[in-house]
Amino acid sequence: MKVVLKIKIETSRKILESIYKALYPETLNLPSTECSAELSLNNSLLLIKILCSRVNLLRAVTNSYLGLISTIINAYEEIEND
């Protein structure tokens, strides 16, 4: 069985490029061979697809990715507010 999660993020190209650059190395070195991830960047949309053989692995990868994404977005918001 494969469990799949697709995440779509729409925001400025600059933020999306930062997210893409932060996540791309993670897709090459996932903690388990039972998971894979794909990234696709098009204009103002970033698509993230995570596939895992078990739900607990999907949750772990998703939490890691969302943590990085949240940190990047928060950093941009702090910079813009200064």
Image (cartoon, rainbow, N blue to C red):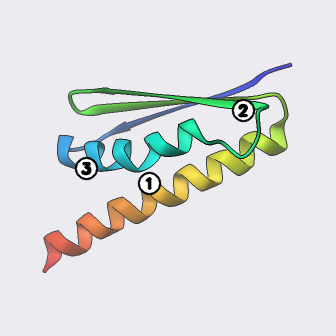
Could you tell me residue 15's position as x and y percent? 25, 50
Residue at screen point 40% across, 50% down: 22
Label 1 or label 2, whichever lies nearer to me, is 2
- Rendered image: mark on residue 69: 1
Tell me where residue 75 appears, x and y as whole percent: 30, 69
Q: Disc 2 residue type?
A: Cys
Q: Position of residue 52 (x, y in %)?
A: 75, 30
Mark before the other along the chain sequence, 2 or 3: 3
Tag 1 secondary structure = helix
In the rendered image, the quadrant that contains the C terminus is: bottom left
Whole-percent x, y for residue 53 in the image: 82, 28
62 sits to left or right of 69: right
Q: Which mark is residue 81?
A: none
Q: Are marks 2 and 3 in contact (CB under 8 Å)?
A: no
**Badge 3 density bin: few <14, some 14–19, many ≥20, Cα 10 Å:** some
Position of residue 34 relative to residue 20, above or below, is: above
Relative side of 36 to 42, left or right? right
Residue 15: which disc? Answer: 3
Question: Disc 1 and disc 2: Cα gap in Å?
Answer: 19 Å
Question: Is 45 left or right of 2, judged from the image as shown?
Answer: left
Mark 2 neighbour density, 10 Å: few (under 14) some (14–19) many (20 or more): some
What residue sits right under mark 2 in the picture?
35
Question: Which one is earlier in the sequence, the residue at label 3 or at label 1?
Answer: 3
Circle 1: residue type: Ile
Query: Is residue 1 left or right of 22 when viewed as pictured?
Result: right
Using the numbered discs, state the Cα–Cα distance from disc 2 to disc 3 in whole angstroms: 26 Å
Q: Amino acid at mark 3?
A: Ile
Above or below residue 20? Residue 64 is below
Q: CA distance from mark 3 to mark 1?
A: 9 Å
The single residue placed furthest to the top in the displayed view is 1
Quarter of the image where the N terminus is located: top right
Question: Badge 1: few (under 14), some or many (20 or more) residues near its Cα, within 10 Å?
Answer: many
